[in-house]
Amino acid sequence: MKKTDKSEYIEVKPEDRKNTIIASVLDWLIAIAIGVLVGVLLVVFVVQRDNVYGDSMLPNLRSGYVVMTEKISTYFKNYNRGDVVILDGSGMEGYYHDEYLIKRIIGLPGETVRIADGHVYIMEVGASEYTLLDEPYLDASVETYVMSGGIDRGYNEITLGDNEYFCMGDNRPVSNDSRNLGPFTEDRIKGIAFIVIYPFNEIGLL
């Protein structure tokens, strides 16, 4: 029988085996900690989950829907007409709830928004005439009006400030929005909703 060369074997001492196990456990703990930290950072600074309350965004969003909202746009103040946004209405006259609102951006900073004859008209920055706003997200039968209180405050025809947005719900007859609350400043926009994640049969981009 051939004699085995003892140099092929490495003796592992019990303390070395223990150190290897400890190092492996530490590696796993570090990986888990990094994963948790990344998850927290994503939730705090990048995306968040928001629930839809009420019927102000029918037929596109129903009460009980859950949406994901991206926050990156809030750092660069990068918003577009038609964006569905999460808004903080606390302290605004006419809003007395704790929940955030979810509405759609209609008018952008510097523009003049006019609501008349059931329609929305926009005079863009630098323009001299109004144009009828195309709103393909609305049900064809929906008309837009301003209640008397909003008219008294001039919200039926308003020129927006440098950091103001005119926001309305898609279900115009029931939505409490800029027609009553006035324009929303940039700091009140908490994110842009970009996808429905619940109910599962309604999952899709907004």
Image (tube, rainbow, N blue to C red):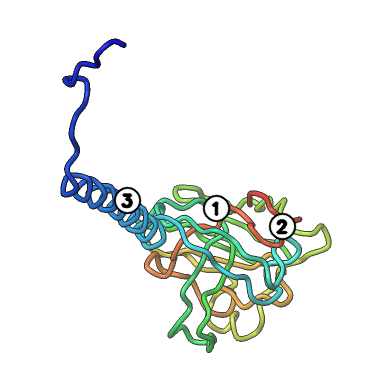
Tag 1 secondary structure: loop
* Inter-mark Cα distance, 3 to 1: 46 Å
Where is residue 128 drawn, in percent x and y? Answer: 52, 50
The amino acid sitting under disc 3 is Trp
* Point 42% across, 57% down: residue: 71
Q: Quadrant of the N terminus?
A: top left
Q: Viewer-proximal residue, 48 or 161?
A: 48
Q: Nearer the viewer, residue 5 or 71?
A: 5
Q: Report the Cα–Cα distance between label 1 and label 2.
A: 27 Å
Given the image, on which type of amino acid does mark 1 rest?
A: Arg
Which residue is labeled 2 in the image? 200
Mark 1 or 2: in front is 2
Q: Is residue 10 above or below residue 179?
A: above
Residue occupying image coordinates x 64% and y 68%: 169
Mark 1: few/some/many CA within 10 Å (<14, 14-19, 20+): few
As drawn, 66 above or below 128: below
Q: Quadrant of residue 113?
A: bottom right
Q: Is residue 57 left or right of residue 23?
A: right
Q: What x and y, as percent, mark residue 204?
A: 67, 50
| Upstream in sequence: badge 3 or badge 1 | 3
